Amino acid sequence: MLEVGSKAPDFKLPDQNGEIRKLSDFKGQKVVLYFYPKDMTSGCSKQACSFGELYPHFTEKNAVVIGVSKDSVASHKKFEEKFNLPFILLSDPDLEAIQAYDVWKEKSNYGKKYMGIVRSTYLIDEKGKIIKALGNVKAADNPSDMLKLVNE
């Protein structure tokens, strides 16, 4: 994880509509930047739907929610449409932001080791500075936990 107080790395990635987005586009707003392993899986769907339900509360606090995985733009579009997600999903197949935010790690499943995204969330302030960094978050609890932090 990157250190709290450090400048959040900028990125340039396509969203679920193919539009190029940069972190710097959101200066003046808080950004909840969350990294998740894969579209359409149970934990990731639960997390995304919960962020979707709470999204109006984030926007009331001048915060945006941005989800990032290595899935394709087309996969993100299907994910957005299936669950009616109101926020940005960024496609990072080349691991540009995923590695810059230090969430690409060795994982283990049934003794088999592989590289993958560790479910992590950053809260970035209006000036682009990291104010919270949470690794290994629980999919179900993460959105409400982040809303509490945005409200502080």
Image: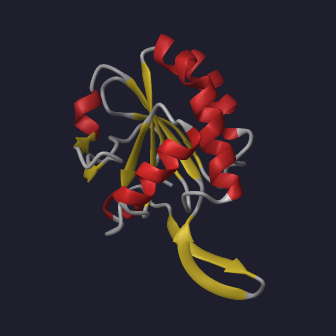
The residue positioned farthest toward the right in the image shown: 110
Locate residue 80 relative to residue 120 in the image: left or right.
left
Residue drawn where x is 61% and y is 24% of the image: 54
Residue drawn where x is 27% and y is 26% of the image: 27
> Foreground residue, 144 or 100?
144
> Foreground residue, 108 or 102?
108
Residue drawn where x is 39% and y is 64% of the image: 99
The picture places residue 136, in percent across and down from the top left corner, at 66, 55
Task: Indicate how the structure is coloured in the image.
Answer: secondary structure
Vertical position of residue 102 compared to residue 77: above or below: below
Query: Which quadrant of the structure image shows residue 92?
Result: bottom left
Query: In the rendered image, which quarter contains the C terminus?
Result: top right
The picture places residue 12, in percent across and down from the top left corner, at 22, 50
The picture places residue 8, in percent across and down from the top left corner, at 34, 43
Residue 105 appearing in the image: yes
The picture places residue 82, in percent across and down from the top left corner, at 55, 45
Vertical position of residue 149 compared to residue 85: above or below: above
Locate residue 147 relative to residue 90 in the image: left or right.
right
Query: Which quadrant of the structure image shows residue 88?
Result: top left
Residue 34 appearing in the image: no
The residue positioned farthest toward the top in the image shown: 60
Residue drawn where x is 35% and y is 67% of the image: 93
